[in-house]
Amino acid sequence: MKKAIMTLLRLRKETGAEVYYTGGSVRDLLRKKKSRNTDILIRGLSFTKISEFLQKYGKVTEILEDHLILFSINGNNDTVRITIPRRARIFDPSGNLYSDAHSRDFTINSMYLPIHKRTKRNLIDHVNGLDDIQLKQIRAINAPAKFRISPVRMLRAISLAARLNYKIETSLLNTIKTMARMVIKVDPEEIKRELVEILLSKKPSKYISLLHEARLLQFILPELEACYGIFQNRKYHKYDVFTHCTTSCDNVEPDLVLRLAALFHDIGKPPTRNYTTIGGKGKMTFYNHEIVGTKLTKKILKRLHFDKTVIVQVCKLVYLHMYYYESSKWTDSAIKRFVQRTKITENQVPYLDKLPLFKLRRADRIANGYSTHEVSLKQLELQERIKTLFENEKRVTAKDLAINGTDLMVEFNLKEGPTVGHILKHLLQLITNDLGLNKKEKLLELASEYLSSALK
């Protein structure tokens, strides 16, 4: 990145153009955080001239519709994003920072720092973005007009807030509520991109709830919106299904598959909800909600154009998350069927706590609102039995030997008796340590050595 910045400093010196850091670069510098991108604005030089100059020093990619240049030094993966003042593109050849700032979406992304004077005292802030950083809030610039042009900006406001752990300024939230229906015009790929930003944030539940409050969720994830206010058996669940799912999402690591599975694992409960009265006592049931939930999850993820691999992995977790382990009822055969169904391998046995399904189970338990322990004793017992299953399968018995007592009696002219048993026991101990010895010829050779030593 340093070489790219040096090139831009050279451009400023040789052409007389004004070169500024802007966007997330300035925002994150003021927040004392590392920025994802290096955003640059160049004033006083045409798009074409900028591109021609930079091509002498590195790779240039022009995105004409956005008047954006992506510039990187050859052999360097760091890319600088370069624009010119937005008003200059159409109206004023020279452009100016005031009009550019007011053409941007959010105040915290609409400030500038000269590339050669990157200090706070040189900050150019026409929209009071610094105040919003200090207040930790997202405030839009002329929100209604911007949202009518590009409704995805409503989602972007919330995803940006999620990434920075900021709040949404009140008037902006009210504007989004009023215009929320326009989000139906947004391309599914764009919805997915903003949703992923929220899901991978530090506390997704806070901002998924904000999507609900802003009236956006009903249009982008109506299946999840349907979970709001659906209460469960209060004996086992403190929260409604919506809060339970979003809280589960908070309690798994920021892995996309895990976060999606946690968010959707109980999404099948609203359509399967049934209230029955037995013996004068009411009971809420959600039979087969994992099956219905798997179908809904697949529908959602396909609608939002998620990768096929992600869809398969998430749906598998949603389908498998409902298992009721009871030690008295689960036989060894039942444990084996569970292992086969969940495709647990021997290599995974030392790390069962790290399996996605068991991570989801942990998050599910924490999110019921009552559990004092993240992992139940039943879950721990299940994991121990899985370990025991694999250990037992590794054990070799006399039946596994490539020879038997008859082979020994014929080979060494022995009579049936303790000697044959001793030889078999000795051979069994040997192959337990090295299964490669379990070949008939080799075992007969080892049996001969054993007999020879015994006769000495």
Image (cartoon, helix red, strand yellow):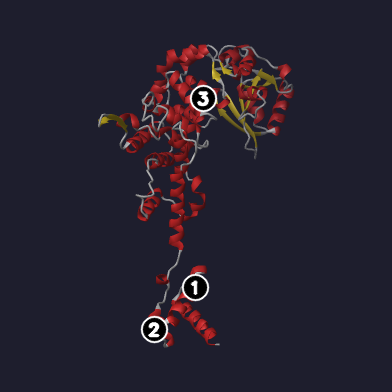
Q: Residues within 10 Å of mark 3 (few under 14, many from 20)?
A: many
Among the 4 quarters of the image, the one containing residue 48: top right
Rendered location of residue 188, percent (x, y): 42, 28
Quadrant (top left, top right, bottom left, bottom right) of the N terminus? top right
How many tags in the picture? 3
Q: Examine the rendered structure and indicate whether residue 165 appears above or below residue 367.
A: above
Q: Nearer the viewer, residue 65 or 185?
A: 185
Q: Residue at x 40, y 84 (%)?
A: 409
Residue kind at label 2, given as amino acid type: Glu
Q: Which residue is mark 1?
A: 437
Residue furthest out toward the front: 279
The picture places residue 78, in percent across and down from the top left corner, at: 63, 35
- Asked if the residue under mark 1 is in contact with the one under mark 3, i.e. CB atoms within 8 Å, the reply is no
- Disc 2, disc 3: CB below 8 Å? no
Which mark is drawn over residue 159? 3
On the image, which quarter does residue 9 sit in?
top right
Residue type, numbered disc 1 = Leu
How crowded pointer 1 is (Cα within 10 Å; few <14, some 14-19, many 20+) is rated as some
In this rendering, would 44 be left or right of 197? right
